[in-house]
Structure formats: structure tokens, C-alpha cells
Image (cartoon, rainbow, N blue to C red):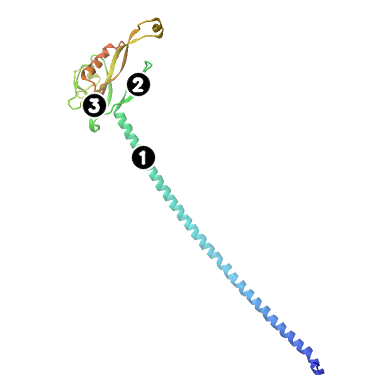
Amino acid sequence: MRLSLPQAACLPVVALCLVNVASAFNFQIHAHHIGLRKQSLHVQQLHASSAPDGVEDEARKLRELASQLRGEVDAFQKEKDEVTAAEQKTRDEIMAAKQETRMKYSTEVPILKGDGQTVMERVDFPPRIKDGKSSIMAVQADLPLGILLGEHEEIPGAISVDEVAAKSNGERADVREGDILRACTACQQTMETPTWQLLAGGIGQPKTKRFMFATDGRPFEEVMDAVSSNRMDPEGRAVWLVLERPE
């Protein structure tokens, strides 16, 4: 197709107009992008301006929660400590009660050991009188004792002190009527032969041993013999009497 001269002359003008239109369109698009970026920046600024308040609020809540948890932990630990202290107090009271009971129903007496030595030991004597209305005591009295023993009328197998002579050794040792004799020292003669005499065919020599004799359940005559046997003590020592005294 051929263009006439006037039409050809118009082409630069049309091209220029198209360029201007394109430029205007591109400018509008660029302006629109700029506006979007400004709007996005404004939104970001709004978020940035509001974020510190939100973080601070969350931090405050976390601090409050942590404080509450610490309070609960402290309260739990306090309650646990109180329970532990109460349990320990109960155990201490039980141990103290047991110790008090043991001290009430025990006493130190001379015990003859297997090697021939005599040592003082605390010995327990379960009460024969019920309801804890008694206590155990040990006394020492020289012979003659000046006391009268008999079988207890209410407690089977028990030996009681029925009478204490005035100004007697028993009275001076604080033996009282109504006491129950639980144990006493007794003496027994044995034949002791050294090893060299056994090798030589010797018969040995008599030796007197003193030991504690428990009277519970023993026949009355046997108890009387045990008390009387203290006369055999070559050292003439005082007689040990373990007594259970009614309160």
C-alpha cells in the first residue's frame, strides 16, 4: 500500500502521540506503584508503632504467670516442709515415748560375762503390773536384808515383798511392802581347773561366781535359795535387788 505525501507527513505526528500516550500510561503505572509502596510503608509503620505495646503486654502477662508459678511453688514447698516437720516431730515423740518407757522398765545391774568379768548393763524388765502403773528400780542392801518375801496373791509366778522390818538393811535400801522382786544377785560354787592342772590330772579348785538371777516364774523356794546364796560371796558384797514398784 502506498501513502500519499500528506499521509506520510502525518506519521511522525502519530508516532509522537503514541509515545506520549505510552509515556503517560507508564507514568500512571509508576505513580500507582509508588502509591502502593507508600501505603505498604504506612501499614508497616502502623504495625511497627503498635508492636511494642503488644510485646510489652505479653511480657507483662508472662511476668505475672511466672510470679504466680513461683508463689505456687513456694506454697507447695512450705506445705511440704510443714508436713516433713510434723512427721519428724511425730517420730521424735514416738522415740521419746519409747525411751521413756524403756527407762521406766529397765535398770542397770551387774552382768557376769563369759570371760568371768562383771560389767554394768541396762536390762529391760517387761512390767508385771498392768496399765503402766509401776516402774523398775534396783537397790543394794547388806545382809541380813530384814524383809519377808511371799508369792503374789494376784500375779501368778511373781514374788512380792510382804513385810520390811523397821530399821533393817532392807528399809535403809528403800525396799517397800508391795514391791515385786524381779531379779536378785545369787552365788554359785563351781570347780575351776587351770589348763596345766588338767594336763597333770588335777581336780581343780572351787570358785564362787555371782550373777543376776531372774525370779519371774521361778518356784518360791528357788527364789529364797537364790537370795540366801549371797552369804556365799567371799567378798561380802551387798545384795542387788531389782524391784517393780506399784505407783
Q: Amino acid at mark 3?
A: Arg
Q: Quadrant of residue 160?
A: top left
Distance between the alpha carbons at the discs numbered 1 and 3? 32 Å
**Residue 140 at what x, y percent from top left?**
28, 19
Distance between the alpha carbons at the discs numbered 1 and 2? 33 Å
Q: Amino acid at mark 2?
A: Met
Q: Residue at x 76, y 87 (%)?
A: 15
Sequence-first tag of 2 and 3: 2
Tell me if I can see residue 240 in this picture: no
**Residue 44 at what x, y percent from top left?**
60, 70
Sequence-first tag of 1 and 3: 1
Against 160, is 24 above or below? below
Tell me if I can see residue 51 in this picture: yes
Distance between the alpha carbons at the discs numbered 2 and 3? 22 Å
Q: Amino acid at mark 1?
A: Lys
Against 12, is 36 above or below? above
Compare residues 213 and 88 and report the one nearer the observer.
213
Sequence-first tag of 1 and 2: 1
Q: Residue 89 shows which numbered tag?
A: 1
Against 121, is 72 above or below? below
Determine contact: label 2, label 3, CB under 8 Å.
no
| Total number of numbered discs in the rendering | 3
Compare residues 134 and 113 and report the one nearer the observer.
113
Residue tagged 2: 120
The quadrant of the picture occupied by the C terminus is: top left
Residue tagged 3: 245
Q: Residue at x 66, y 76 (%)?
A: 33
Q: Quadrant of residue 208?
A: top left
